[in-house]
Amino acid sequence: MPRNIRIYSGTANRPLSEAIAKYLGTPLGNANICHFPDGETFAQFEENIRRQDIFIIQPTCAPANENLMELLIMIDAAKRASAARITAVLPFFGYARQDRKDRPRVPITAKLVANLLTTAGADRIITMDLHSQQIQGFFDIPVDHLYAAPVLVPYIKEQFDKDMVVVAPDSGSVKMAMAYSDMLEAGFAVVAKRRIDGQSVESSHLVGEVEGRTCIITDDMTSTAGTLTAAAAQLKKMGSGDIYALVSHCLINDKGREILKNSPIKQLFTTDGVPIDDDCGGKIKVLSVAQMLGEAIRRIHIGESVSSLFKIKKH
């Protein structure tokens, strides 16, 4: 790699940052990130970054507010240290679910976060599997939107035969599920969902043929596993075979782990875009996106196209 690139990590997912730096063959830069007694975040780059191409890796997962603020402070510090270009690498873009005004007197927080990142001094964004494509339009700076599919699909193909059904657990995930269905050369089904409140959902009926077939429920993220397990229960009622789940971002909390453990889902496939502290006794299978993100960083730094990263490798 050319010498004028520097890779820095926030505290949200340092193992992923280390894996990316290893792929690039460059050490992580030294940054001092600490907190004052009242909780304020402090960040300082411990080496000269003047006229350097800076990449700051920080998913804004839980605790979302703290990780987002830390990223903003690091970007501001880099801008004031005269970095040539600052790219914020968000393997997971928090607040993405608040992307539209669907009720009276609510914010569009995804747009607010986009404004904050730009105002702080980011020149470019790299992210992965946004909750909705429209969020790219919230930015007035370039956004490289990557997908977890090139990592997840080859693994799924190795594990299962072609008699699979990809299932959308609600109407919002239909487009994503159809894309996975095409890539896996599998069937397609949709489960209708009714959200009861912020933490619980109810699945009502199923469209598609699943009897006796392996089902893979796909979604972009999960935190309580409610949508996934409700869909799994509906699939079982319809006589499906083994049930698996596939999500790009596993934000699962303690309640979600208990729900997942007691659900019909045999295994959940996800990425290391956010840290996974507990794999639920092997029920969560984590695949690394470090090489894909590292290659995107390399290509952006030297001015190459990243579009080939969207292609699925055939075995």
Image (tube, rainbow, N blue to C red):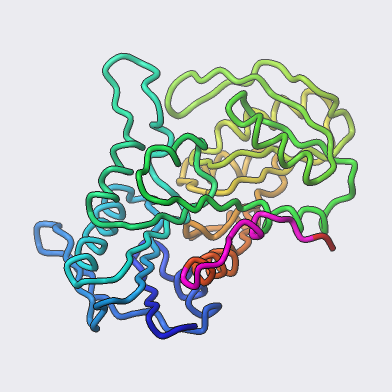
Rendered location of residue 259, percent (x, y): 56, 39
Q: Is residue 304 magenta?
A: yes
Q: Which residues are magenta?
A: 301-313
- Residue ID at (44%, 21%): 197
Tag count: 0
- Left or right of 190? Residue 34 is left
Camera-side residue of 26 and 124: 124
- Residue ID at (59%, 64%): 292
List the single residue furthest toward the front: 303
Decide: is 196 above or below 182. above
- Left or right of 88? Residue 35 is left
- Left or right of 312? Residue 203 is left
- Left or right of 43? Residue 265 is right
- Residue ID at (61%, 59%): 286
Rendered location of residue 73, percent (x, y): 21, 60
Camera-side residue of 309 and 276: 309
Decide: is 311 above or below 167. below
Q: Quadrant of the C terminus?
A: bottom right
Which image quadrant is residue 262 in? top right
Camera-side residue of 26 and 193: 26
Decide: is 192 above or below 56. above
Q: Is residue 24 magenta?
A: no
Camera-side residue of 163 and 101: 101
Rendered location of residue 213, percent (x, y): 87, 36
Which image quadrant is residue 80 in? bottom left
Rendered location of residue 210, percent (x, y): 84, 29
- Residue ID at (28%, 76%): 51
